[in-house]
Image: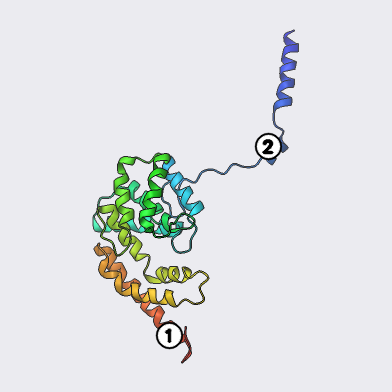
Amino acid sequence: MKTSALAIAAGILLLTAPSASSAQDAPAVAAAPTATPAGIPLDSPWRRAVYEQANTHFLHPSWGVRHSERNYVLGMALAQADGLTIDPDVLFAAAFLHDWGGIEPFDLPGVDHAVRSVELAEPFLTEAGFPMEKFPAVRAAILGHMYDKEPEGPEAVVLHDADALDFLGALGAARMLAATGEAHDYDLALRRIERFAADIPPRLKTAPARDMAVQRVAVMTDFLAEVRRETPEGARP
């Protein structure tokens, strides 16, 4: 009797165990990323939710997830160089969500994109498990991120300067040209490059950002000069 029971049990195991071929054919489940491509830690469920949202839906050549990642990395570097104590959680949430309200289909006509980003970010972060006692600092950073705003709080200051620096240099020129989309020309982009080179540096708040802006403005100035040199006389670039 005992032998029969063992035989039956063994038969059941053989019938229910997956074959080697079926195990090999089963689709692999992708592991959740533990860091962004730049090495920013995704070490909490809410960070992974924020990054997944940005990496899935914020796909714009000028204002998308790559811009957000650069803002976080540069913001952290500016804080360290300027001796500012910041909360990385606040900077992470603000950097990756600050342009949400300016990207289709989330934008609303007549609503400032930073205000719209705050409207979208608050319920999203609540649901994602973000420590909402930190949200006022996230709100301040998002609302103050544009170069013509006055940021309030250390995270707002470094995001403001990082975002402004990303309008300058070769990256800034590339972003402005990419933002032309399907326009018939890039006249507006060239005007913005010229204007930003003049308007942004005086508005930077940290000394390290002002130092970095010098080289970036020189790159933009050289770029515009080269565009003019390569344009045939009487023609438009």
Q: How far is disc 1 from disc 2 in space, using C-alphas?
A: 62 Å
Give the amino acid type for the residue marked by disc 2 in the picture: Ala
| Camera sees residue 2 | yes
Which residue is the extreme one toward the bottom?
233
Q: Quadrant of residue 219?
A: bottom left
For the residue labelled by badge 2, is the local secondary structure a helix, a strand or a loop?
Answer: helix
Residue 77 can be seen in this image: no
User: As displayed, is residue 136 above or below residue 167?
Assistant: above
Pointer 2: what residue? 23
Q: Position of residue 81 (x, y in %)?
A: 27, 58
Using a 10 Å C-alpha cutoff, classify the residue at mark 1 as few (fewer than 14 neighbours), some (14 to 19) or many (20 or more): some
State the residue position of label 1: 228
Query: Looking at the picture, which amino acid does disc 1 mark?
Result: Arg
Q: Is residue 99 above or below residue 134?
A: below
Where does residue 78 sit, x and y in percent of width and height?
A: 30, 58
Residue 161 falls in image quadrant: bottom left
Task: Identify the residue at horizontal 44%, vertical 82% (top origin).
Answer: 227
Residue at the limit of the structure toward the front, as seen here: 110
Q: Nearer the viewer, residue 203 or 81?
A: 203
The residue under the point 47% across, 55% down is 58
The residue lying at 39 percent from left, 83 percent from top is 225
Disc 1, SS: helix
* Residue in front for this viewpoint, 28 or 87: 87
Question: Which residue is rendered at x = 49% and y = 46% of the image?
Answer: 33
Q: Quadrant of the N terminus?
A: top right
User: Do the numbered discs 1 and 2 sit on residues whose CB atoms are within 8 Å?
Assistant: no
- Residue 197 or residue 35, whichever sits in front: 197
The x and y percentages for residue 63 are 43, 61
